[in-house]
Image (spheres, rainbow, N blue to C red):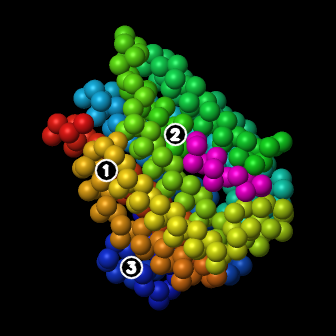
Amino acid sequence: MPVEVWRQTKCQVLGSEVVPSDSAYAPDEEDEIPRATLIWRAVKLPIYSVALIPLTVGSASAYLQTGIFAARRYFLLLASSVLIITWLNLSNDVYDFDTGADKNKKESVVNLVGSRTGTFIAASLMLILGFTGLTWASVEAGSIRSILLLAAAIVCGYIYQCPPFRLSYHGLGEPLCFAAFGPFATTAFYFSQGSASDPSYLPLSGTILCASVLVGFITSLILFCSHFHQVDEDAAVGKISPLVILGTEKGSKAVKAVVVALYALLVAFGLSGSLPLPCIFLCALTLPMGNRIVSFVEENHEDKRLIFMAKYYCVRLHTLFGAALAVGLVVARKIGIR
């Protein structure tokens, strides 16, 4: 993922210096923004790591338990998860358009295509296709637990943004995000690697529960940091995000607390034996990225042009940490550590 800020800006990413060009992400103060740039922002491609990481960590946890990996089912679930995330993104634009939150957001899909109805229909189609794929994979695995947990995750997504609930407007987006992508989705994907001939051979273990908590933490951090650059706009339409309540300065301290808690939990889960040592070692290698997020937010929380990039740093941490966690689980199985 490109990590640009603005012209002539230098930033440290994992200890290496990057000299950026014009950002494809950061908001532009000029009236005219190239349509290609707006489309790139609307697609939000880096955010799709939130479909990949819960599935990969859940599947790796199942592999640790059984030594078996159902590859075809994994890719069916991945495609279905991408469709569900697309539904979330499109429907979020639809309902933010309805409330006026996206009135001046040029990269809103509704504003780009000029059709609220068309965007809503596309979102609904993505949901139907995605849920069909998830159900198919769960039936193939013979796991009622998997489809129930995935349904719960989708319900979290619905009440997060859709009427009459719109709980994101009441500061509940982050808890819902944690539950949906952490304990619900990650655990569901763990069960989806089971076998229809023996549905009981994947027990609910401390390993998958702890792994799902970590995935939920880092996913919620992405959502939290996505509010920094739009505090005024959210407040104007009555969207009471955590940062509207806290303000950006206290919000930057909250980011630090969450990052510290993430690595503290990692160590605690390792010491308790819930996560194997390779997970602890590999995830600890992502500390520089975690530190980068903390320092970047502390330094730039009042600058809307720069702080826009915070969520993309969080996406990078999410991807690196999740990949390290999954690789650690696979390595533990290979070397006989359970």
Residue carrying label 2: 183
Quarter that holds the C terminus: top left
Quarter that holds the N terminus: bottom left
> Closer to us: mark 2 or mark 1?
1
Residue carrying label 1: 271
SS for dot 2: helix
Q: CA distance from mark 2 to mark 1?
A: 21 Å
Inspect the image, locate mark 1, and give the three-letter code of the amino acid beneath it: Leu
State the residue at coordinates (70%, 70%): 246
SS for dot 3: strand
Give 128 or 329, whichever is nearer the viewer. Answer: 329
Question: Which of disc 1 and disc 2 is earlier in sequence?
Answer: 2
Give 331 or 259, whichever is nearer the viewer. Answer: 259
In this view, 302 is above or below 176:
below
Looking at the image, the residue that sits furthest to the top is: 197
Q: Is 124 inside the magenta-drawn segment?
A: no
Residue carrying label 3: 12
- Determine if residue 58 is in view: no
Q: CA distance from mark 3 to mark 1?
A: 31 Å
